[in-house]
Amino acid sequence: MAKLRLADGTIYTDLLTISNELSPLNIQLNYWSVGEDPQLHHLLEKESLNDEEKEQVLKALDGYFKQLQQTANYQSRDLIVLHPETPNLDALLAKFDRIHTHADDEVRYIIDGEGIFGFVRPDGSQVELTVQAEEYINVPAGTEHWFYLTPKRRIKAIRYFIGTEGWVPQYTGTEINVRPVLV
C-alpha cells in the first residue's frame, strides 16, 4: 500500500487522498494487480532474474503495456531488478537520489519490493511517496523528483518508455529538505 508523507510528518495511505495530494503535479498513481499466475509469482519471489526470466515476467504482464501503447504511444518496456547483491547498486542509485527532472514521463509499475519517490510541489514543499508491489506511477516530464530504495533495498519494476533518450536525469540543484523515510 502506498504511503505519502508530507513535510509536517502527516502520513496518508488512502489511494484517493494520496492522488488528491499529488494532483497539482499531475502524478498518476494506481493499483495494478499482477494476477494469480503461479509461475509469475514463483519468478517474483526470486531475488534476481536472468534475461529469459525477465522476459517471461514482462510477457505475463503485457496487458498493461498494450493499454499504454494504445492510449499513450508507449513503445518499449523493460524490467529492472535491484537487490542488495546487485553489482554497483549504490552507484546506480546515486544517479537518482538527487532532485532531477526528465524530458519524458517516468512510468513505473512496481511488481515486487518497494521504493520511495520524493517530489517538489508547486508551493516548494516536498513530499515522499513509498510505492510498493502492484502500484503503477506516472511522474510527468519536468516534475522535480528523486528516488531511493527503502532499507530492504529490493525492487522489481517494469519501466515503460516512449523513447529512452528523454529518461536521462537533469539535475535541478534544488536541495532535498525532508528526512528519508525509514520503513
Image (cartoon, rainbow, N blue to C red):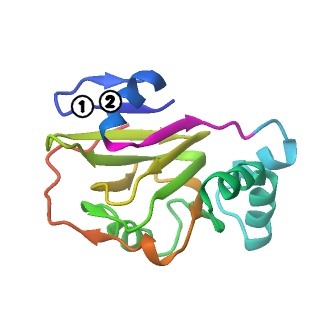
Give the alpha-carbon distance from disc 2 to disc 1, as whole Å: 9 Å
Q: Nearer the viewer, residue 148 or 26?
A: 26
Note whether 68 is above or below 79 in the view shown. above
Q: Nearer the viewer, residue 49 or 19?
A: 19
In percent of width and height, residue 143 lies at 31, 55
Residue ID at (55%, 46%): 113
Write down the region rendered in magenta: 25-34
Tell which circle, 2 or 1, labels the residue nearer the N-terminal end: 1
**Residue 151 seen:** no
Kindly identify which residue carries mark 1: 6
Q: Which SS class for mark 1?
A: loop
Note whether 100 is above or below 111 in the view shown. below
Name the mark on residue 126: none
Quarter of the image where the C terminus is located:
top left
Kindly identify which residue carries mark 2: 21
Q: Is residue 46 left or right of residue 175?
A: right
Residue ID at (14%, 59%): 174
In percent of width and height, residue 31 lies at 59, 34
Residue lying at the far bottom of the rendered structure: 165
Note whether 16 is above or below 82 in the view shown. above
